[in-house]
Image (cartoon, rainbow, N blue to C red):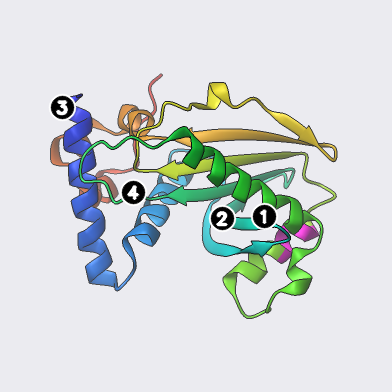
Amino acid sequence: MDNNLAQFVHGLNGDIHDQAVGSATSPDDVFSELMLEYLSDAGVVESASAAKFEERIARGIGRVSGYGVNDDEDTLYLFITVFLDAAEPTRLPPEEVRRALEQAVRYGENALQGLHTTMSDSSDAYSMTARINELAGQIEQIRVFVLTDGVSSLTSTRMPDRKSAGKVWSFDIGIPNDFLAYFSPVLLRTRSISTWRQFGPPLFPV
């Protein structure tokens, strides 16, 4: 087992629980917000907002943990969290990754087609879903991110892009090995979320 990875996962899990207690927020929501902040600050996506949706749509479940849209409004980002609450590196079965992707795609396809008309307009999920439908004619690409604290052998290279209704869907699987490579040495030494926020976002290799 990679010692840096083990230390990172252990420290991250502890920080997530500390922040959850302090903010009266669930650990999985804290994890989602942390990863969205990371992706946005590091420039992986141009925007990212947390907004939870999980409901039955037709014969399956649609689920996402947040979304974003690029500045040109032609790329939609969908984020779905698989939080294992792992204090040490823990394997995430490929079928769980695929299930999460299917749930996010089911939500995205239906959001583009007017899912918001069946929802209460008082929720964050409604605003997200209505916005996606508003941009349906402009969106050309949809990137689905699986955000997890588990370690998966199923990588983005094994999930080929697909095209549906004139839109290209691509899939990104965020696992600790990926995130670990991007975190600054200061964060790796201290394993502290507060240190990340003090010294800036993770650094991408050149």
Q: Residues within 10 Å of mark 1 (few under 14, many from 20)?
A: many
Which tag, 4 or 1, sits closer to the chain's start? 4
Q: Residues within 10 Å of mark 2 (few under 14, many from 20)?
A: many
Q: Could you tell me which secondary element the residue under label 4 belongs to?
A: loop
Write down the residue under mark 4: 84
**Does the rendering let one see residue 64?**
yes
Q: Residues within 10 Å of mark 3 (few under 14, many from 20)?
A: few
Q: Quadrant of residue 53?
A: bottom right
Mark 2 and mark 1 residues within 8 Å of each other at the beta carbon: yes
Q: Residue at x 47, y 27 (%)?
A: 154
Which tag, 2 or 1, sits closer to the chain's start? 2
C-alpha span from label 2 to label 1 = 7 Å
The amino acid at mark 1 is Tyr
Write down the residue under mark 3: 3
Q: Which residues are magenta?
A: 130-134
Q: Residues within 10 Å of mark 4 (few under 14, many from 20)?
A: some
